[in-house]
Image (cartoon, rainbow, N blue to C red):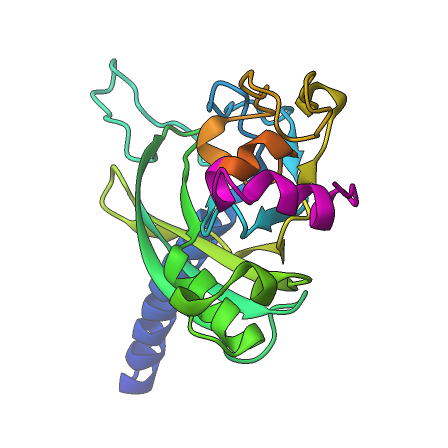
Amino acid sequence: MKRTRGDVMSARFVIIAGILGALLVGCAENRSSFFIQQFQVVSEDCEATSDSTGASHTYGILDVGFKWEYSIAPLLVNQMSPIANSENFLVETNSVQVEGANIRIWRGGRAQGNPFYEFYQPAVSFVPPSSTTVTSFVGMPRQAVSALLQYAIGIPPEELTFNDMLGYRDLITIGVTMLGTTTGGQEVETPEFYFPIHLCFGCRVICPAESRDEETSMYCEAADAPEEAGCSELLGQDYSIDCRWCATAFGPEEGPALCRQYFCGIGD
């Protein structure tokens, strides 16, 4: 049967469409095969596990009386199949070299409308195929917290006083998209992962019995160093805060008394 020009053009269209379809499927497959599963809990020795069954956060808490940035430890999953084969001289092309993250921040508990703040955060990690890897970096920087405080309270952050901050509470949602390149040279990214963070002032402070000074009977003034709950680098994030840290945060003269009165409800 004689092939017409239209037949040839149709055949070409089918071939091109097939190639484009394969490329799109490949991109979709990589996007669904490389993702953030959860944000890992950082241990007391400041380490986060790559074990997918390890403890994870469903939300975060940032006490801005002690810390003005929030760090995250995303667990990255690479479900692409390994293809390296020494017998056939095949090198691995499905490992992912992580290069950074695009992060967006919304006020409120949902990611709706234009973000309040967005930025790119460098982050280096390597995820072999069929494996999980944890990485860690700042998910909400100091600049974003400063902007949130000024928006909510209406005072430049550098001018805020203890009384200005009392009662401050806010809720934000961050969206994290990890970016990387496979060892085969293909750019990949994770679907955006959403995570709520509660901001507050003094809400994580506790006044345990151990903080009570034996001579004065005053809480928050015991001379011995407080037991840190969690990683010391994350003081003010997620974990409870022993009120003996108030002297460091708010000054040795007024700090303990302020925490007793406003955070623990204990009068002098």
In percent of width and height, residue 120 lies at 32, 59
Residue beneath the point at 70% across and 16% down: 214
The answer to whether residue 155 is seen in the rendering is: yes
Residue beneath the point at 73% across and 26% down: 208
In the depicted structure, whether residue 209 falls above or below residue 187: above
Q: Nearer the viewer, residue 228 or 30?
A: 228
Residue beneath the point at 35% across and 63% down: 119
In percent of width and height, residue 7 lies at 34, 80
Q: Nearer the viewer, residue 186 or 219?
A: 219
- Is 255 contained in the magenta span? yes
Q: Which residues are magenta?
A: 248-268
User: In which quadrant will I find the C terminus?
Assistant: top right
Task: Give the quadrant of residue 129.
Answer: top left
Task: Give the quadrant of residue 147.
Answer: bottom left
The answer to whether residue 79 is seen in the rendering is: no
Task: Give the quadrant of residue 166.
Answer: bottom right
Q: Nearer the viewer, residue 176 or 132?
A: 176
In the depicted structure, whether residue 211 falls above or below residue 100: above
In percent of width and height, residue 252 lies at 49, 37
